[in-house]
Amino acid sequence: MVRICVAGGTGQAGREVVRQALVLGHAVAVLSRNPPPPGAREGYDGAAYFCADVTTGEGLPEALAGADVVVDCLEARTGKALRRYAAGGALLLGEAAAAGVARAVQLSIVNCDQSALAYYRSKADKERVYARSTLETRTVRATQFHSLVAGVFDAGSHVGLVPVIKGARFQTISPADVASALLEAALGPPSGESHALQTVGGPEVLSMGSLAGAWKRITGARGLVTELPLPGSTGRFLREGKNLAPEQRYGHATFEAWLANRLENL
Ligand SMILES: NC(=O)c1ccc[n+]([C@@H]2O[C@H](COP(=O)([O-])OP(=O)(O)OC[C@H]3O[C@@H](n4cnc5c(N)ncnc54)[C@H](OP(=O)(O)O)[C@@H]3O)[C@@H](O)[C@H]2O)c1
């Protein structure tokens, strides 16, 4: 039994890490700014939830006490949180080292160091923080989640459009498959490297147009599939396939299977 602290264990990927770690029989502590109250449906029985903030350090010693491994599934998308994302990682690692944690694994994004977007730059900055840490660290880069693409279609369909970025392909992956990779990295034998980098992709590389077709068929949602150009560096990043990892097809759940399962559980 390993004592795992999941930072961001209430989010999409983090919740799956918590669920799978509990199934495997490990002791799980979760830290986030807004943990579920005791007994709430959003929490997992058997996990201990802590209120902690990696930007201030508040609550970190309590959440990390006794942990062997940290799995970092934190996220920051905009504004001050985004600007402090890498510094938050440094604070978490510093407190983890002080608490006697042996290894830290973080979730990042495939080829984030090859994009000029501030969001991607924050991921690359945090990867460098992990690479400099005195702890044994592992970075698991994933391709986009199924939910990201489905979220774009969902949002567009509210105004009658299912937007498709011209020339974009995706290799989407389920949070459950990402969580398996994170736990393998967290629990596997030492790799011999103090800092390791691994990439995991979904099972299929598909054009955004064919993902849109599958999404319409499975959800039954209305909306005109509309191809739109995406200018600038993000459009180029996608057209060049930098969001893909065709040699690293780690995930098993396809977009269609994930979507059908999501609808079944609504
Ligand atoms: N979505 C994708 O397509 C994709 C693809 C590849 C990689 N990733 C990466 O996967 C990671 C996780 O993404 P996700 O979608 O699972 O994120 P998410 O659902 O937004 O969850 C983020 C988690 O971090 C916690 N958190 C945020 N700020 C915090 C802070 N200052 N202190 C403590 N906890 C904090 C949140 O809880 P509170 O808000 O309650 O604090 C939540 O538990 C991200 O780094 C993302 O870049 C995402």
Image (cartoon, grey):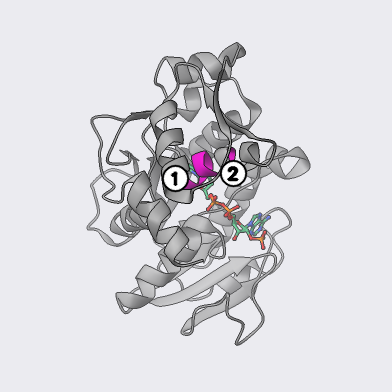
Q: Does 35 sit above or below residue 87? A: below
Is residue 145 visible to the viewer in this orientation of the structure? no
- Amino acid carrying mark 2 in the image: Asp
- Give the camera-side residue of 141 and 161: 161
Q: Is residue 109 above or below residue 121?
A: below
Please provide percent x and percent y for residue 25.
Answer: 31, 79
Residue visible at 72% across and 65% down?
58
Question: Is 106 positioned to the left or the right of 256 in the image?
Answer: right
Asked if residue 121 is among those painted magenta in the image, a careful observer would answer: no
Which residue type carries mark 1? His
In the image, farthest residue toward the bottom: 39
Q: Give the residues in magenta.
A: 147-152
Left or right, residue 73 beside residue 102:
right
Q: Magenta segment: does it hold 151?
A: yes
Report the disc number at residue 146: 1
What is the crowding at mark 1: few (fewer than 14 residues within 10 Å), some, or many (at least 20)?
A: many
Circle 2: is it few (<14), some (14-19), or many (20+) Cα within 10 Å? many
Q: Which residue extends farthest right?
A: 80
Q: Tell me where residue 61 appears, x and y as whole percent.
A: 61, 70
Q: Are marks 1 and 2 in contact (CB under 8 Å)?
A: no
Picture quadrant where residue 37 is located? bottom right
> SS at mark 2?
helix
